Image (cartoon, rainbow, N blue to C red):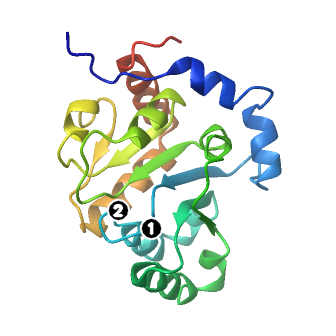
């Protein structure tokens, strides 16, 4: 038997014991009226996190006002990390203030619990756990359609796709899910249902 999207729900429950989205959002200073965008993974060229920073640069100020962005998985020893930080530091202050970069950590579930939208900007993946985690935590997913990801989430059903490096497409997808609450909820519910876990 091939079990697609195998996910250890019991482990996830243990990790978030005594945590709630509200507690996590308060701890991370996310306001009630803000939507939290999350990306998780070692900051490196293969993961492509610079796409997200470039998208923030293109976003209208009205959209940026509504957002809080966490890039979790920084490894400052890598050249790619330096490039990413340089791009963040070059942003206008009001946009720079919206991005928080977090070092690699095992304590990632609090970020999932606090978030609304998940961005996966990878160039190469097999069957990434981060997509499963985003599905489990009912996040609206925006992702590149690379390798096994297309087996996990279908475009316009459980996620919105953008081609790697296509910043215009990524920006437009962020605008869509930010403005359209019904779309956000539909993508998130469909993604979680694909894991076979309800509600």
Near mark 1 (Cα within 10 A), the count class, few <14, some 14-19 or many ≥20, is: many
In this rendering, position of residue 165 left or right of residue 198: left
Circles 1, 2 touching at the beta carbon (< 8 Å)? yes
Name the residue located 41 percent from the left edge and 33 percent from the top edge: 132
Q: Position of residue 169 (x, y in %)?
A: 27, 60
Q: Which quarter shows the N terminus?
A: top left
Name the residue located 33 percent from the left edge and 60 percent from the top edge: 170
Q: Position of residue 13 (x, y in %)?
A: 64, 22
Vertical order, 88 against 184 (above or below): below
Q: Which mark is residue 47?
A: 2
Q: Which residue is mark 1?
A: 43
In this rendering, position of residue 92 left or right of residue 141: right
User: Which of the 4 image quarters holds residue 160?
Assistant: top left
SS for dot 2: loop
Question: Quick one: 50 or 116, which is closer to the camera?
Answer: 50
Name the residue located 40 percent from the left edge and 39 percent from the top edge: 129
Vertical order, 38 against 149 (above or below): below
């Amino acid at each position: 038997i091939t079990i697609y999207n195998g996910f250890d729900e019991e482990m996830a429950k243990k990790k978030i014991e005594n945590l709630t989205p509200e507690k996590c959002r308060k701890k991370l200073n996310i306001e009630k009226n803000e939507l939290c965008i999350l990306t998780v993974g070692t900051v490196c060229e293969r993961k492509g996190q610079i796409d997200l920073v470039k998208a923030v640069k293109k976003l209208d100020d009205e959209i940026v006002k509504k957002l809080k962005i966490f890039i979790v998985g920084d490894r400052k020893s890598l050249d790619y990390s330096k490039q990413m930080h340089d791009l963040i530091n070059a942003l206008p202050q009001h946009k720079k203030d919206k991005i928080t970069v977090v070092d690699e950590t095992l304590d990632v579930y609090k970020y999932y619990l606090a978030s609304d939208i998940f961005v996966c900007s990878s160039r190469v993946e097999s069957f990434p756990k981060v997509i499963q985690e985003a599905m489990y935590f009912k996040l609206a997913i925006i992702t590149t359609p690379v390798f096994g990801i297309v087996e996990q989430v279908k475009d316009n059903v459980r996620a919105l796709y953008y081609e790697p490096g296509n910043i215009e497409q990524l920006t437009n997808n962020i605008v869509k899910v930010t403005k359209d609450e019904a779309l956000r909820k539909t993508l998130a519910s469909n993604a979680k249902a694909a894991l076979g876990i309800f509600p």
